Amino acid sequence: MSGIGLGGSGGVSRNRLFALGIAFAVFFTVYLVHLISIQVIDGYFYRSRAQQVTRRANVIPAQRGVISDRNGTVLATSVDRFALDLNPAKVPRDEFQPLVSRLTSILDLTAEQIERRIPPRARNSHGRHEIKSGVSFETIAYIAERIDRFPGIDWRSQPKRHYPHGSSLAQVLGYVGEITPEELQVLYNRGYEPRSVLGKAGIEREYDVLLRGTDGRRVQTVDALGRPVSDRSDNVPPEPGNDLVLTIDYSIQELAERALGERSGAVVVLRPATGEVLALASYPSFDANSFLGAGGDDAFRRAANDPRSPFMNRAIQGEAPPASTFKTILATAALEEEVISTDDVIDAQPFYRLGNRVFREWGVDTRGGGFGEVNIHDALAQSSNYFFYTVGSEMLGVERIRKYAEYFGLGQPTGIDLPGERSGLVPSPEWKRETQGEIWVGGDTVNFSIGQGFTSVTPLQLANVMAMVANRGTIYRPYIVQEIRDPETNETTGAMEPEVLHQAPVDEEVFEEVARGLRQVVTEGTARHSVSTNAVESVGKTGTGEIGSDDRYHSWYAAYAPYEPENPKDQVVVVVQVDAGNEYEFWAPRATDLILHGIFKDQSYEEVLEDLNPWYM
């Protein structure tokens, strides 16, 4: 019995030992797996996390694309400038103030300005603190040659936008600046970052995505104090922005700006056969170069607070009554609607009476009477108000006048590739009731007929009116950017093609008759003493916009040349508008005279004055 009990006890012990072995093996296996996980798998994860935490990235700015005119003249570019940084931890404590003193002598900064950038709590940190941006290469070279006297100083490329022609074309080109928090909220998902530079106006804004390029990165691994742990860095090179070629011809642009002079107003020169804008001048202007670097904020504030509104592009944003230039549209409507023929005459009296209201013919005080019997050509040439009062009020009516104004593109944007374009206004009885709370009356139609009253246009819209006549019924969308080019190969990657904006259902012979009347404006009408160039035969229409002052009027002149071209692509439209804020001097047709002479004689402004010897200068 004792043998049986002993044998049973031994079997139980072996079972326990076996179970204990199994448990130990499982425990060892789990421990080994956990150890491998910690050392290999988790170790890899945490090393990766540690590297991410201690990897510091610095932006390498992309070079912004160059903007040039159609002939290669550079209008906007980027010049080499640098940002100067300081790593305070690399500056011995007793060397900090001497270093600040040396920096003030070469950076045009005060000690207080530098110390504000490096507050006491940051004096022992290994971070990079920007001391100044827009530093010249010469200053960087000076520091590099004496680097032992500038401990902790480093620099990085920071291209600065530069406009070689200063205030010329400023409203067209625009300017750049650092992104604001509000802009970043909108643009963050498009690749913009807190210190991105972007276009704020003009071409710089409209084509910012193409111009800006893609910033690069320089990534270094640093320790917990921000010190580099190796000289190795991972660099992602920046990609430069695209270059833009504009339709602008800078020689014509300069001619237009000089002809306008220091008069508040605008000039538009475009090619009617394509819509290419050859010049777009607006005065007063601003110099975007002054907005960058030291004093830039103050310069921007001065321009923004200038009551003359230099940021306004008057060519596309300046709205004013078209005055008698509107008679071009009315003449087209009258002939197309057959309410009058070229043989019909109207006895243009000194006063036009409608009910108890009297509307004056222009120049009655000096001439002493009306123009007498005039046909539509004579009425355009002499700009007879009475003739067009009669045609508009008694023959066409407000709705047909509106219809033809819209055929010519008024009351709507042209769609030019610039931001901020305004649409002007073609009034209607409904518009007056809704906005003025009044009904449309006969006097409104009378004023509407000669481009006064509520009607307003921009100079670019009026340029399209003349383009409609020049093209005998077609308007092309005006455009500024002609080509997009690769910055490295200079190959064209995109090009603008002419696009029809409006096609008026008007007989071509009607436009020919209107053009005949506009030619008479130059040969024997209101512009005969002002447009004297013999370089080309032109057509045109004067306009004097009333603002309720005896010595202040908007001066308009809209023209195209040649009158009868061998090749339509040789034609140009020129529109000049001088704002009523200037003393009235009937300058618009005179400025057009200078511009046309310069274009068709291929002369500079000085050469035009010498060759033309204008009596009005």
Image (cartoon, rainbow, N blue to C red):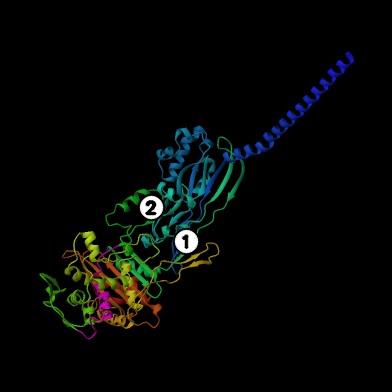
Mark 1: secondary structure = loop
User: Can residue 617 be seen at all in this image of the molecule?
Assistant: no
Side of 523 relative to 98 (left or right): left
Quadrant for the N terminus, please: top right
Q: Which mark is residue 291?
A: 2
Disc 1: CA contacts within 10 A as few (<14), some (14-19) or many (>=20): many
Instruction: Point out residue 375 in the picture as x, y percentages from the top left corner.
Output: 21, 83
Instruction: Point out residue 578 in the picture as x, y percentages from the top left corner.
Output: 26, 66
Residue 299 in the image: above or below residue 558: above
Side of 73 relative to 231 (left or right): left
Check residue 271 for magenta coloring: no
Q: Mark 2 or mark 1, which is nearer the start of the sequence?
A: 1
Side of 447 relative to 510 (left or right): left
Check the image and name the residue furthest to the top: 2
Instruction: Point out residue 275 in the picture as x, y percentages from the top left corner.
Output: 39, 71
Q: Which residues are magenta?
A: 318-344
- Residue 114 vs residue 564, the one in the foreground: 564
Residue 389 in the image: above or below residue 51: below
Check residue 324 for magenta coloring: yes
CA gap between label 1 and label 2 equals 19 Å
> Label 1 amino acid?
Val
Judging by the rendered image, the residue that carries numbered circle 1 is 66
Residue that appears at 68% across and 35% down: 37
